[in-house]
Amino acid sequence: MKSEFVIKIKNLKQQFGKCTVLDNINMNVQKGEILGILGPSGSGKTTLIKDIVGMQKPTNGSVTVLDAEMPSLAVVSSIGYMSQADALYEDLSAYDNLMFFAAMYGLNGKKAQNRADEVLSLVMLKEHKKKLVKNFSGGMKRRLSLAIALIHEPKILILDEPTVGIDPVLRREFWNEFENLKKKGAAIIVTTHVMDEAEHCDRLTLIRYGSIIAEGTPEDIKKSSGENSIEGAFLYFGTIGKEGKV
Ligand SMILES: Nc1ncnc2c1ncn2[C@@H]1O[C@H](COP(=O)(O)OP(=O)(O)OP(=O)(O)O)[C@@H](O)[C@H]1O
Ligand SMILES: [Mg+2]
């Protein structure tokens, strides 16, 4: 039977100079699954995300997305990526930003316009579509970044702290949309510091000092730490020497 794993990470190591930021990372993500990556600031989450989307090459080991070893141009159009730092054209309007990225993914004309309107509605920015991005608030930029990540209806979504600066109502909308995309078969990786969001993931991977220290469903993680909340488990595994492969 063909593997349903659409993202495969094997023995990944990432060094910058003499500094090892990630070591011995192994993980897989299936279609129709949301994987949450948790870990303290500086633990290596964004570095891992950049290896997955092919922005940098691992020092050792491999990342395979849809059977292509990353970095690979062949799968770029199947990946929606929302970086931790918004990568937007400040002197263009929200709509023009979307049309630019749509064109990069081969979407043009009426199809691109309709899709741009759809994703703008989704992130509740339709009434601001003509506004220049440099006049956007922080949360509005985050919302536009998500719209851009979704414009080409990717099968793989990689979201690095997508809800920073987003109010609770809209955060719930974002998560409803992630659930919808998951139901349609997308594979989603999301990093977050929001423990309530971690509860919505199918599986969690906890990273500390560049290594995986615990993995499993939110229930498994709570059980193995003896805590009744993900926050409690996060604090438990944050203590030196505790490991929880569940
Ligand atoms: N290109 C680079 N060159 C040197 N060091 C780097 C580089 N990229 C990341 N690092 C280092 O790798 C470590 C992990 O950084 P990373 O951005 O992956 O953390 P993070 O888990 O995403 O943190 P946060 O929760 O604050 O976003 C940090 O010490 C960072 O300084
Ligand atoms: Mg980060």
Image (cartoon, helix red, strand yellow):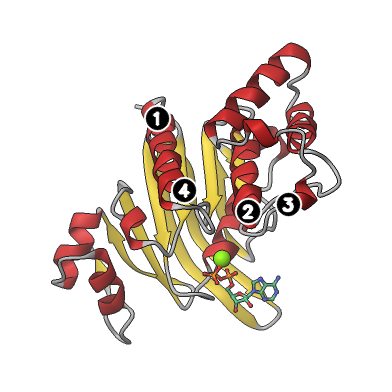
Whether label 2 lies within 8 Å of ligand 2 gets the answer: no
- Which of marks 2 and 4 precedes in the sequence? 2
Q: Name the residue under label 1.
A: 180
Q: What residue type is labelled 2?
A: Ser
Would you call the spot at circle 3 few (<14 residues within 10 Å), some (14-19), or many (20 or more)? Answer: few
Q: Residue at x 33, y 80 (%)?
A: 238
Q: Nearer the viewer, residue 202 or 244?
A: 202
Q: Residue at x 64, y 56 (%)?
A: 138
Q: Name the residue under label 2.
A: 83
Q: Can residue 15 be seen here? A: yes
Would you call the spot at circle 2 few (<14 residues within 10 Å), some (14-19), or many (20 or more)? Answer: some
Q: Mark 4 points at which residue?
A: 189
Q: Distance between the residues labelled 1 and 4?
A: 14 Å
Which circle, 4 or 2, is nearer the viewer? Answer: 2
**Secondary structure of residue under mark 1:** helix
Q: State the image coordinates of residue 233 (x, y, percent, origin top left).
A: 24, 71
Q: Mark 3 points at which residue?
A: 87
Q: How far apart are marks 3 and 1 (CA)?
A: 25 Å
